[in-house]
C-alpha cells in the first residue's frame, strides 16, 4: 500500500536551534518525494522535491532533505530555525505518471522564543 | 511566477445546497487535481483530470461530486447536495506534464456547510 508516515505530530524547537522532521514512505514504484509547508489558513507551498540524482536536496527558506532508500525515509532538516518557520509541514509521495500525491498527516512546528 | 488561483476563498452554504468551487490552473498545464483537507487532518486526493476526462478518483469522490473544465482556463468542482462532512479546505492543483513535473497547489477554498 502507498502511504506516508510522519511520526511526530507536534515539535517545538527554540529559535536558532536545528530542526529535523521525520518522514517514512511506502511506495511500490520509484518514489517522487516532496515536502510542503502550510501556514495557518493558507495553502500548500512546495519546499523541496526529490526525483532522482543527488540524495541531498536543497529547497527554499534554507531547508534541505535527504532521501535514504534503504530506510524509506525523506527527512527534512534546517540548521537554524526562525520564528517564521512555525507552520505545518507535510511530507508527500507521488509517482512518475500523472498520479495523485499522497500526503502524510503533517507535523506542526512551534518555535520557542 | 504563474500561480494556481481559486475562488472563492471562503464559502458558507446550507446543507443540501449545491456549490461550485472554481480554479484557474497555470496556463500551460495539462493535468488538474482536486484535494481536500478536513480541519486538522491530512490532505486527501479527490480526483485527477486530463484531456477532458477523469483519470483517477478516490472513494471520497462519489456521485455527489463532479468536475468540469468548461472553457480553456477554468477547472471546477461541483458538490451537488452538500453534507456537513463536506466542510473542508479544497485545494486545486495542476501539473504541466506527467513524469517528473511538480504539482502546484492553489491557496484553497474553505467550505463550511451548516
Image (spheres, coloured by chain):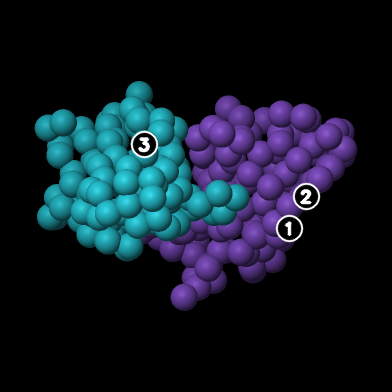
Chain colours: A cyan, B purple
Distance, label 2 to label 1, CA atoms, is 7 Å
Residue shown at 66%/39% (left/top)?
B88
Placement of B82 over or under B102, stated as above or below: above
The tag on residue A11 is 3
- Mark 1, Cα crowd under 10 Å, few <14 / some 14-19 / many 20+, is some
Determine the chain carrying the residue at label 2: B
Answer yes or no: do the residues labelled 2 and 1 have beta carbons within 8 Å? yes
Q: Nearer the viewer, mark 1 or mark 3?
A: 3
Q: Disc 3 on helix, strand or loop?
A: strand
Answer yes or no: do the residues labelled 3 and 2 have beta carbons within 8 Å? no
Determine the chain carrying the residue at label 3: A
In the rendered image, is residue B8 in sight?
yes
Q: In this view, does B13 lie to the left or right of B48?
A: right
Placement of B59 over or under B106, stated as above or below: above
Q: Which of marks 3 and 2 is in front?
A: 3
Q: Name the residue under label 2.
A: B11
Residue shown at 35%/57% (left/top)?
A82
Q: Is residue B97 left or right of residue A58?
A: right
Q: Is residue A70 left or right of residue A10?
A: left
Residue A104 lies, in percent from the top left, at: 40, 35
Q: Disc 2 on helix, strand or loop?
A: strand
Residue B20 lies, in percent from the top left, at: 77, 50
* Residue A69, picture quadrant: top left
The reply to whether label 2 and label 1 mark residues of one chain is: yes
Determine the chain carrying the residue at label 1: B
Q: Mark 1 points at which residue?
A: B8
* Residue A64, picture quadrant: bottom left
Amino acid at each position: 500500500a502507498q502511504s506516508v508516515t510522519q511520526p511526530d505530530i507536534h515539535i517545538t524547537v527554540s529559535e536558532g536551534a536545528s530542526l529535523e522532521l521525520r518522514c517514512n514512505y511506502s511506495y511500490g514504484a520509484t518514489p517522487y518525494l516532496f515536502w510542503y509547508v502550510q501556514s495557518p489558513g493558507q495553502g500548500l507551498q512546495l519546499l523541496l522535491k526529490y526525483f532522482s540524482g543527488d540524495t541531498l536536496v536543497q529547497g527554499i527558506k534554507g531547508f534541505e532533505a535527504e532521501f535514504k532508500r534503504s530506510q524509506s525515509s525523506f527527512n527534512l532538516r534546517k540548521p537554524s530555525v526562525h520564528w517564521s518557520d512555525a507552520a505545518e509541514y507535510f511530507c508527500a509521495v507521488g509517482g512518475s505518471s500523472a498520479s495523485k500525491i499522497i500526503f502524510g498527516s503533517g507535523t506542526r512546528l512551534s518555535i520557542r522564543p | 511566477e504563474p500561480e494556481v488561483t481559486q475562488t472563492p476563498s471562503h464559502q458558507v452554504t446550507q446543507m443540501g445546497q449545491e456549490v461550485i468551487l472554481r480554479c484557474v490552473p497555470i496556463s500551460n498545464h495539462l493535468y488538474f487535481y482536486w484535494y481536500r483537507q478536513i480541519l486538522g487532518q491530512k490532505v486527501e486526493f479527490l480526483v485527477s483530470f486530463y484531456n477532458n476526462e477523469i483519470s483517477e478518483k478516490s472513494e471520497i469522490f462519489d456521485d455527489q461530486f463532479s468536475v468540469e473544465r468548461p472553457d480553456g482556463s477554468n477547472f471546477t468542482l461541483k458538490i451537488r447536495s452538500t453534507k456537513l462532512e463536506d466542510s473542508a479546505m479544497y485545494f486545486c492543483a495542476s501539473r504541466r506534464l506527467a513524469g517528473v513535473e511538480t504539482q502546484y497547489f492553489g491557496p484553497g477554498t474553505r467550505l463550511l456547510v451548516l
